[in-house]
């Protein structure tokens, strides 16, 4: 087990190095220069030269890459050209927002998807089964930004029940020690802030969770269908266990294996792919930040941010592999 | 019974299952989902081809006076789905948008498919160092989330319709490359490949006329499903403002961006393009699912 973990961690190195080269090369291929975007098109050549010198852009390309590697090696991801804050600081403030959103979306998908898939399989071929299949197909086919617009229109514009932008009431002034707003509210013992944070989270979480929900439903249904005809399920029934015990201990427990893989993969995608959701709901996370960075040609943000997300994605996948080995004792890792 | 008679009987027994594709076609025809999907896609193709005949108005015809003081007048007898903030007929724009969506799907998927096909089959067939190099590159591409990679490519190429199609296509490359490599690896060790090599067929010909045709079934399934995601992703990039820079272009995703501002006064403007995207994506998803079931070798002979 330990050897497996170490080997997987070592495999991270070439992948991350590759990502850093790719990101670095890509940024050099972008049209326009950061000096231009910072100073405007009518900047004097001296000012441009000074900016280029300040950010080391006048050195040979391999020197720039080496400097880049040296700085990220020391944990310094540079300073955002647009906001003048360090990239690490920005990630520290924005990543919690994205994590909170992704976890809420995944929680929503699991809480609805597993029971839905389970009951569909139990009532295989019934109208309920068909309806949930159709619903999950539509869930996969609906673009997040369209769903987001619909939710925003119904619950924010029409009914006025829920807020549709930001993470908390814009007039609120509250301390945020961890930047996980729900956790912060709990730490501060402030029920008003807690409700405020949850209220802001509901619509984006449902929009972002729609695709995982559809996938979780389908996978759960397929897995339960597979498992419930196994010999050990028949044995469990034959020896007179209550149906509830058979379902929870034998059927669902084994059906969880494929579900856990999907959950991991999807969580990685949610953490990194929330660009659209964050844009629609003005959620101050990593996704919308990187999108803005592209429009601003904010090189340090792009390099650091994408590298960071790639690391997160790869690490989440590693955790999935490991948890898979823990959940399923039959898997003996070489 | 003589041996000849036995063989004749076997042949007679096997004849109803006329090969993978005939079987698949028979199963596909009996799958209501696949039929619905095919009908959806077919109607979008018809709408796209005959858009100028079907659309009641010119999709780019601006009529600011018709908009009035508040955006935007709702559906009426003259404009069935209302008009947008510049007074253009919404229905006509959605109808012309079908052209863009289908072209988008085809271009994006064929870009991803052709590059992925080439890289994947070379990696699988040649093996060794080439294989490692190609597949590690694919791993790196997969380590960057798809939409972000696409946004990055658009930033490099500049915003525009062609650019977003190519960007989405490129994000599909590693998926197809992996799929093809796995398929080719499985086929490479088959007897018919050995036979071809034994009679001296050239390597390139073995790859293209013996291995690839047999490795193509999962690619077709993935290709159909990729059409669905490509349409969504391109619409998403359009929604972020990276799509066609001419605001007159009736691309569905771009149309939705402009709607966000008028959500309060003219929510119906979001409805049309959104539903059009959902239906076209649903169509490809249904066909893809149907194909996957139809081409599943485990189900062969159970037409």
Image (cartoon, coloured by chain):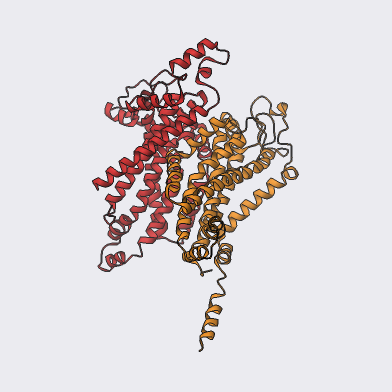
The percent position of residue B292, horizontal first and vertical second, equals 51, 58
Q: Is residue B163 above or below residue A91?
A: below
Q: Residue at x 62, y 33 (%)?
A: B244
Left or right of A146: which side holds A215?
A: left
The percent position of residue A284, horizontal first and vertical second, equals 43, 27
Q: Residue at x 46, y 62 (%)?
A: A125
Name the residue furthest bottom.
B1
Q: Is residue B183 above or below residue B271?
A: below
Residue A165 seen in the current view: no
Q: Nearer the viewer, residue A159 or A137?
A: A137
Q: Is residue A184 above or below residue A225?
A: above
Left or right of B222: which side holds A168?
A: left
Judging by colour alone, the chain drawn in red in this rendered image is A
Q: Is residue A313 above or below residue B220?
A: above
Left or right of A3: which side holds B19?
A: right
Q: Residue at x 50, y 23 (%)?
A: A296
Residue A189 seen in the current view: yes
Q: Nearer the viewer, residue B126 or B271?
A: B126
Judging by colour alone, the chain drawn in orange in this rendered image is B
The percent position of residue B37, horizontal first and vertical second, equals 58, 54
Q: For the image shown, how many numbered marks are present on the structure?
A: 0
């Amino acid at each position: 087990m330990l050897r497996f973990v170490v080997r997987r961690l070592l495999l991270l190195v070439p992948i991350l190095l590759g990502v850093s080269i790719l990101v670095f090369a890509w940024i050099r291929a972008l049209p326009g220069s950061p000096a231009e975007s910072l100073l405007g098109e009518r900047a004097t050549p001296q000012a441009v030269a000074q900016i280029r010198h300040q950010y080391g852009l006048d050195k040979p390309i391999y020197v720039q890459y080496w400097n880049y590697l040296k700085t990220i090696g020391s944990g310094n991801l540079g300073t955002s050209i647009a906001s003048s804050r360090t990239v690490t600081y920005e990630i520290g403030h924005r990543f919690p927002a994205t994590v909170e959103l992704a976890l809420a979306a995944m929680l929503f998908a699991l809480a609805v998807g597993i029971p839905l898939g389970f009951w569909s399989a139990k009532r295989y071929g019934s109208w309920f089964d068909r309806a949930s299949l159709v619903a999950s197909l539509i869930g996969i086919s609906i673009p997040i930004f369209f769903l987001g617009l619909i939710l925003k229109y119904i619950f924010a514009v029409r009914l006025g029940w829920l807020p549709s932008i930001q993470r908390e009431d814009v007039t609120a002034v509250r301390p945020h020690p961890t930047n996980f707003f729900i956790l912060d509210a709990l730490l501060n013992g402030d029920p008003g802030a807690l409700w405020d944070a949850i209220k802001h989270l509901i619509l984006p979480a449902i929009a972002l969770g729609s695709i995982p929900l559809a996938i979780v439903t389908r996978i759960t249904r397929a897995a339960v269908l597979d498992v419930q005809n196994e010999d050990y399920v028949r044995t469990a029934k034959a020896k007179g266990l209550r149906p509830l015990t058979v379902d929870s201990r034998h059927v669902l427990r084994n059906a969880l294996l494929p579900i856990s893989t999907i959950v991991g993969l999807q969580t990685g995608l949610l953490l990194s792919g929330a660009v659209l959701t964050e844009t629609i709901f003005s959620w101050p996370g990593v996704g919308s930040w990187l999108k803005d960075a592209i429009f601003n040609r904010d090189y340090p943000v792009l390099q650091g941010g994408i590298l960071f997300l790639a690391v997160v994605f790869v690490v989440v996948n590693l955790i999935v592999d490991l948890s898979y080995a823990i959940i399923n004792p039959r898997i003996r890792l070489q | 019974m003589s041996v000849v008679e036995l063989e004749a009987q076997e042949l007679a027994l096997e004849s109803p299952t006329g090969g993978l594709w005939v079987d698949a076609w028979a199963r596909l025809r009996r799958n209501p989902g696949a039929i619905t999907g095919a009908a959806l896609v077919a109607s979008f193709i018809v709408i796209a081809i005959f858009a100028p005949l079907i659309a009641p108005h010119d999709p780019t015809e601006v009529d600011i006076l018709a908009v009035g003081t508040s955006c935007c007048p709702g559906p009426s007898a003259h404009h069935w789905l209302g008009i947008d903030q510049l007074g253009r007929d919404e229905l006509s724009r959605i109808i012309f948008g079908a052209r863009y969506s289908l072209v988008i799907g085809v271009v994006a998927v064929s870009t991803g498919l052709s590059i992925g096909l080439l890289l994947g089959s070379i990696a699988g067939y040649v093996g060794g160092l080439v294989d490692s190099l190609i597949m590690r590159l694919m791993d790196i591409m997969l380590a960057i989330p798809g939409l972000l990679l696409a946004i990055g490519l658009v930033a490099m190429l500049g915003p525009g319709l062609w650019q977003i199609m190519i960007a989405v296509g490129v994000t599909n490359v590693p998926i197809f490359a992996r799929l093809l490599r796995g398929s080719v690896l499985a086929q490479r060790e088959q007897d018919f490949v050995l036979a071809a090599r034994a009679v001296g067929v050239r390597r390139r010909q073995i790859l293209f006329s013996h291995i690839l045709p047999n490795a193509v079934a999962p690619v077709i399934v993935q290709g159909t499903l990729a059409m669905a995601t490509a349409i969504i992703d391109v619409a998403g990039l359009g929604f972020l403002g990276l799509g066609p820079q001419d605001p007159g272009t009736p691309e569905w995703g771009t149309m939705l961006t402009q709607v966000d501002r008028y959500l309060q006064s003219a929510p119906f403007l979001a409805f049309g393009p959104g539903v059009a995207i959902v239906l076209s994506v649903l169509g490809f998803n249904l066909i893809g699912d149907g194909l996957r079931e139809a081409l599943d070798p485990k189900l062969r002979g159970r037409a």
